[in-house]
Amino acid sequence: MADDAPTPPDGTDISALLKDWASREPEARDRVVAVLYEELRRLARLHLNRERPDHTLQPTALVNEIYLRVATLERMQWRDRTHFLAMMSTLMRRVLVDHARMHARDKRGGGVSVTSLDNHEAPGPVSSIDVVALDHALTRLAALDERQAKIVELRFFGGLTVEETAAALDVSPATVKREWATARAWLYHHITTP
């Protein structure tokens, strides 16, 4: 699958850097993060915009947290820029879910962060959901249909377009649209039904 994203202004070949990182080239990891830093911050802002207003994490802190997690990885295989950013978005989601769980535990169940599905055409009148409940529902969905769960992660949490999601998963845009609609309906049902 070709990386159809534009080359950064400095002409860096992201796919080549990612291959170098996978081959354990000493400076490749830091170079990838430096070149894609603004995109990583954009992803972090997207995630944090869906969190509670008083969230203690800032975009830079979230990027730093995922950097610490990937810096120690021994084995990874990034196909291209889109795949790398999708995986970073998934890691951001995990960090935020961990943070929400810790916050809920600290508050003895109160103050759990919420995120909106309204911007993503959720069926029905739901206005906000508990991010921990969404994570739990996504885990259940992944047990039933891993690709649908991945589509939700990439579209909802990663902010990828239908076309970018299709490229990341190596499926057609029509498949992404169909499974995105099915997954949203399934999640809506399982999050709103006690």
Image (cartoon, rainbow, N blue to C red):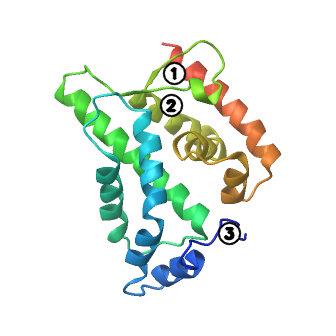
Q: Which numbered disc, 2 or 3, marks the residue that appears first in the sequence? A: 3
Q: Quadrant of the N terminus?
A: bottom right
The residue lying at 50 percent from left, 84 percent from top is: 20
Q: Secondary structure at mark 2?
A: helix
Considering only vertical position in the picture, is 194 above or below 36?
above
> Mark 2 is on which residue type?
Ala
Disc nearest the viewer among 2 and 3: 3
Rounded to the nearest whole Å, what is the CA distance between mark 1 and mark 2?
7 Å
The image quarter containing residue 122 is top right
Q: What residue does disc 2 label?
A: 137
Residue 7: give x, y in percent of width and height: 62, 72
The residue lying at 72 percent from left, 71 percent from top is: 2
48 sits to left or right of 190: left
Disc on res. 191: 1
The residue lying at 55 percent from left, 15 percent from top is: 126
Mark 1 and mark 2 in contact? Answer it, CB < 8 Å.
yes
Residue 33: give x, y in percent of width and height: 42, 69
Furthest residue toward front: 9
Q: Which numbered disc, 1 or 2, marks the residue that appears first in the sequence? A: 2
